Amino acid sequence: MPEHDAPPYRIEAGTTLAAVLRKPPIDAIDARILVCHGLKLSRVQLITQSEHALDTKQAQLLSDLFIRRLAGEPVAYIIGEREFFGLALYTTPDVLIPRPETELLVELALERLPQRGRVLDMGTGTGAIAIAIAHTRPDAAVTAIDASGAALQVAQRNATQHGVHVQFMESDWYAALDGQHFDLIVSNPPYIVANDPHLSQGDLRFEPIDALTDHADGLSALRTIVHGAATHLMPAGWLLMEHGYDQAEAVRGLLQRNFDAVQSWKDLAGIERVSGGMVRGSSS
Ligand code: GLN
């Protein structure tokens, strides 16, 4: 874990919750989430117990949580959870923290998923995309791969937690999928360019580097996924991939050769965030 100097911060015993939250040293919403987590309070209890004075242990506990956040550690890793598509997902430093923009990829996938369709999620991480699809469409047969065994353990725990069946496999992209065909392939692969300054800023510093960057031009994982997709898609099957804010045109270019109806979709911030197409001709 990277080392970061946090400014000194200490909550004194006897301080009320209201006082702690009035001027937190971190983002106000983060502070509320950490207090609820640390003291095991619901959001309503946080309000009804706002005049509660912290004892020594509680003051220490909250100081420690705030100091971790001040040092830059993402809230999702501190509390071990992040919500995605309405599902609370267990989240550890072995996996990328689910992002709201990835919900666009799930929505586009759901629109294109035939009854009892077979779906493949490549580089599943927390399992977010695969589990959101399986949860919304119990008729679907969802397979999810990741090259990281640690990530697959997190994903399996999330699938079990939400009572969905996903077939998880350890695989370097298509390596373990010989002869398997799908109606839909989805992926949020590592797409940040090697040495992008964002990798050493903010929450990204704490996330698994191999989930963020391909250590190359940012397009190598996307290229691998596109190249293998034609042989793993059923006729008229779709490939949908998330990518970086400036990669839409390049990804459409990769798709042109073997896909029809190639297009990109904008996320809520108005950024082209997902591109995809329908495989041309029959699967081979
Ligand atoms: N969307 C992430 C970010 O820019 C990157 C995730 C990825 O590389 N798949 O922070």
Image (cartoon, rainbow, N blue to C red):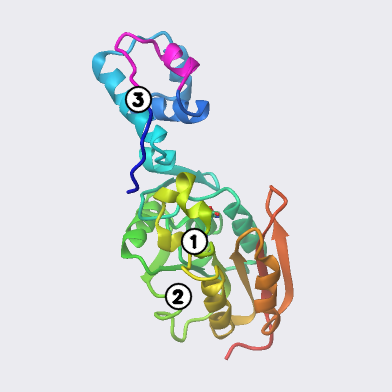
Q: What's the CA distance linking mark 1 and mark 2?
A: 23 Å
Q: Position of residue 175 (x, y in %)?
A: 41, 81
Give the residue at mark 3. Answer: 8
Image quarter in which the C terminus is found: bottom right
Give the dominant element type of the magenta stretch: helix, strand or loop: loop
Q: Height in image: 71 above or below 15?
A: below
Give the residue at mark 2. Answer: 173
Q: Which mark is residue 18?
A: none
Look at the numbered discs 1 and 3 and tell me whether their residues touch, using CB distance below 8 Å: no
Q: What's the CA distance linking mark 3 and mark 2?
A: 45 Å
Magenta range:
8-24
| Image quarter of residue 144 | bottom left
The mark that comes first in sequence, 1 or 2, is 2
Check disc 2: other Cα within 10 Å, few if <14, some if 14-19, many if 20+.
some
Describe the element under mark 1 as helix, strand or loop. Answer: loop
Look at the numbered discs 3 and 2 and tell me whether their residues touch, using CB distance below 8 Å: no
State the residue at coordinates (40%, 34%): 69
Q: Position of residue 243 (x, y in %)?
A: 60, 63
Give the residue at mark 1. Answer: 195
Q: Magenta span has 141? A: no
Q: Amino acid at mark 3?
A: Pro
State the residue at coordinates (58%, 54%): 102
Describe the element under mark 3 as helix, strand or loop. Answer: loop
Q: Amino acid at mark 1?
A: Asn
State the residue at coordinates (60%, 87%): 283
| Image quarter of residue 183 | bottom right
The mark lying in front, picked from 1 and 2, is 1
